[in-house]
Image (cartoon, rainbow, N blue to C red):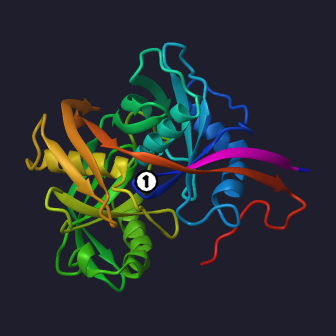
Amino acid sequence: MIKGTFFCIDAHTCGNPVRLITSGHPPLRGRNMSEKRQDFLAHHDWVRQALMFEPRGHDMMSGAFLYPPCDSANDGAILFVETSGCLPMCGHGTIGTVTAALEAGLLTPRTPGQLRLEVPAGIIDVQYQQTGAKVDWVRLTNIASYLAHADKVIDVPGLGQLKVDVAYGGNYYVIVEPQECFPGIEHWSADQLLRWSPDVRAAADAALPCIHPDDPTVRGVSHVLWTGTPKNPDSHAANAVFYGDRALDRSPCGTGTSARMAQRFAKGLLAEGESFVHESLIGSQFVGRVERVTEVAGQPAIIPSIQGWARVHGHNTLVVDDDDPYAFGFQVK
């Protein structure tokens, strides 16, 4: 029998959900968070399914567990869980997790205003501003991000040919700029984006292989980043990110913003030290910046930072009991 009670803090980062699970942490084996991610997927994935999918979650649900660091020199470690799986890195999830954890007293930094956190994709540095009990904003310095494929043409049945790029910002993104078969996110409905995203992702994943040179467990195109004209005059670009089976990111997407900055840097559209304000489908914004230039296995790359905010909006006690026929969640497709 499987039974579990999970205490959760529910928040959102710029509109996209983050559920910080504060109890019921499965014990994970591994020397680092990448290995622990694999152990979780192999032995404990029922927890993710139960807490992210309906009836306890929904298609957009995203969450995290906060763990002690593998290296005592760091402040903590994050395991990301969501409907699409157990991500190597999640930017909006980091901002929401840090906000909820600090406000609840679950994370104590060695240096106020700064954190060094382990995630499956590597090590990230975090800065934040806190006023009283509330965290005003969080800025994370992400892992190395790079352009993996540039100006490639894929054929999407029913839609036609698309010229795309694929970039890595903690996950691999196929980036679709406005063109003949796609006029821009401002001209498509959410239903149209959801209709075509799985086909675009499948076509890109088949045609454009992606395996991270430093961690072969990070592989495959997992997200689609559609672009368009921003609504806000101070935004440099707008995007709508598809993930999972039926999810459109309500935030500007942290790893997606990192991937897009890497794409733009590689194409000479963004310089070292330059800021990049990225807008979501609902108009919320992340402020990105190219902090420095680096390499990934000899390929040009950047170290990007992302700043955003999150708000806690509830506390949950969720019960999972395998006597319930829907204990481990479901999706309606």
Q: Residues within 10 Å of mark 1 (few under 14, many from 20)?
A: many
Quadrant assignment for the C terminus: bottom right
Q: How many labels sit on residues?
A: 1
- In the rendered image, residue 331, in percent from the top left (x then y), is placed at 64, 71
- The residue wearing badge 1 is 220
Q: Is residue 325 left or right of residue 206?
A: right
Residue 116 or 258: which is nearer the viewer?
A: 116
Residue 99 or 319: which is nearer the viewer?
A: 99
- In the rendered image, residue 233, in percent from the top left (x then y), is placed at 14, 61
Is residue 300 visible in the rendered image? The answer is no
Q: Secondary structure at mark 1?
A: loop
Examine the rendered structure and indicate whether residue 249 appears above or below residue 154.
above
Residue 7 is inside the magenta segment: yes
Is residue 313 visible in the rendered image? The answer is yes
Query: What amino acid type should be assigned to the residue bearing mark 1?
Result: Gly
Examine the rendered structure and indicate whether residue 102 appears above or below residue 192.
above
Q: Is residue 18 left or right of residue 57?
A: left
| Residue depicted at x 66% and y 51% | 48
Give the main secondary structure of the magenta stretch: strand
| Residue depicted at x 13% and y 34% | 273
Question: For the view shown, which residue lies furthest in the bottom direction?
Answer: 158
- In the rendered image, residue 112, in percent from the top left (x then y), is placed at 42, 19
Residue 298 or 271: which is nearer the viewer?
A: 271
| Residue depicted at x 22% and y 36% | 302
- In the rendered image, residue 18, in percent from the top left (x then y), is placed at 53, 50
Q: Over which residues does the magenta segment extend? A: 2-10
